[in-house]
Amino acid sequence: MIRLATVFSGIGAIEHALDRMNIPHKIIFACDNGDVDILSKKIDADFNKIDDALNEMESAISKISPIKDEELDIKRELYTLYIKIRTEYDVIKADFKKIYDKDFIIIVNDILKIILEGNDLKNRKRKEYTILFEELGNNNNINKLLLSYKIAIKIVTDFKKDNEVSKLSLLEDVVYKSTYNINWNNVVDKLKDIVIFIEKNNIKKSIQRVKDLSEKTGMLYEKFKTESILQKLNNYKSYKEKKLFIDKIYEKKKMQNKVRQSYLANYEIDEENFHWNISFLDGNQYKHKVDLFVGGSPCQSFSLVGKQRGLNDTRGTLFYEYARLIKEIEPKVFIYENVKAILSNDNGRTWEKIKEVFDELGYKVYYKNGDKPSVLNAKDYGIPQNRERLFVVGFRKDIKLEKEFRFPQPIKLKKKMKDFLLDNVSGRYYLAKKGVDFVTNKKNLEKRYTQIDGDIQLCQKKNQQFNWHGDFVFEEENINKEKTMKELKKYFLSEKVRKYVLSTGTKNFYTKPKTDLDIARPLLTTMHKMHRAGVDNYVTTEGRLRKLTPRECLRLMGFCDSFKIVVSDTSAYQQAGNSIVVDVLINIMNSIIEAYPDLIKKSA
């Protein structure tokens, strides 16, 4: 019986892997906040809002009453971060003052006026531009300039989208059409002036600097809030009291944690052992009670899709929390997973730091597959999805291995993505309960009147379509199959969306759209939003283009159809995209057991 624990548990990939392998196991604890956030604070990319937030932080940090040397360090660390961000704020603000241009603000304001004067302007656009016009009038100085930058970029973007052009036309006498009912001909000359100013002053970069600053300020707030809760936790002596305190904080967010709902619906675990936040989990309560510890840390700070701040991001620093739990729990074996981009983050320095931390934990750590980092691709382990992930495996040094651990070797891919799609067979081909009872009747099976999932078909009869004798195929998903096509309808793309996802993209993201791939592109947490076909996966059914259903996405992550979907499609897509591929874990587990068979022989 393997005693299992997971953090950033998601929908339980290792739990499902052990189920599929028929390996007895008990879940000691699981931890996942399901994207429920009570710690961070969204701070608008606005000079005044950032300034207010920094002032609030300075005041809050100064009120931390140091009791122990450890808290002195916390206060010093928070104040150091505050000074760093405040200094950056002053530099960026000074840079904005240098490029302050009153005429640019006037041009943007004039364009907004002209657009709003159009009597036929669509209501949605009128509302958008009215809000921007009012905001511009209510701001002053540097903030007014910053807002005018944002508005200018939005107007130019709307123009290009409305007229399906990549740049402003320099031709004379061009009549611009508009689905928004905006008379672009009245503002095109001013738009050209704006574009020249945008490119000359690189204002997109200026806006991004302010946005990055607002996010850093938000991270400071999150770190402060986390430390404040940790200080309060110190007032409780027992693990039970600490758990009740944290549960109380998250109590009103329980229904928002969709990951928790999926996890509890599919696995046996006492709720007292499902935790909300790794930062508030004391691993000492589980010391020597865990055989296998599996998890990772949020990939957004390392992912190529994210900003790649690495360990400087509050999400990236959760890696240290994962390492802390290994040290406190002392499991026999651990498996760590993250995106491949972690290797190149910060020119490789992030990965070197992570290896250094792992090497200090008292474990024999494996992070190479041959001469290369242990990056495993799902398509090499039975699942037709091109999903590369880095894996690290560690064995406690007091454990004697029967043989040296090696990451699993690739196996030949025998299936294509289409093999994982739901069947869209009409309901008339499926038997109702009465028919199922007849076909599965012992007498009919023994006398070979009927056959289910046979290797060699029974002799076909002329009238077999009128009775229930002959061959039948059992499929777990065929219950209520007559609804299949009806249920698929919501996944079909409208002509407008179809045109978008099949577009080749822009100069910043060019791709040749393809659908019905043999090997799926990596499943993303954002796939419910429908990006271009160069990012997400699309298939055709009866000549119509559709996105994958949540069930198909789960299949492509290695989850059997027995896995219960108890959340909305949006949440199901996100959970599938966040998971580890089950078949990859099965292959890793086989390699672990081969090196350390006592994991399943002697685990209590």
Image (cartoon, rainbow, N blue to C red):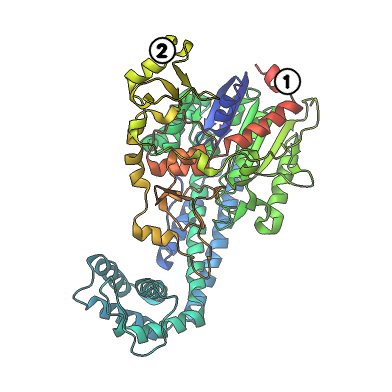
Q: Residues within 10 Å of mark 2 (few under 14, many from 20)?
A: few
Q: Disc count in the image? A: 2
Q: Residue at x 64, y 38 (%)?
A: 381
Q: Position of residue 400 (x, y in %)?
A: 79, 25
Q: Earlier in the sequence, mark 2 or mark 1?
A: 2
Residues at discs 2 and 1 in contact (Cβ within 8 Å): no
Which residue in the structure is indicated by mark 2?
A: 441
Three-letter amino acid code at disc 1?
Asp
Q: Is residue 360 above or below residue 138?
A: above
Q: Position of residue 383 (x, y in %)?
A: 59, 40
Q: Which residue in the protein does label 1 denote?
A: 598
224 shown above or below 46: above
Q: Amino acid at mark 2?
A: Asn
At x 53%, y 30%, the residue is 30
Q: Residues within 10 Å of mark 1 (few under 14, many from 20)?
A: some
Picture layout, residue 26 above or below residue 535: above
Whether residue 585 can be seen here: yes
Q: Is residue 15 left or right of residue 131?
A: right
Q: Residue furthest bottom?
A: 172
Name the outermost residue toward the left: 119
Cα–Cα span, label 2 and label 1? 45 Å
Looking at the image, can residue 602 be seen? no
Percent position (x, y) of residue 455? 55, 25
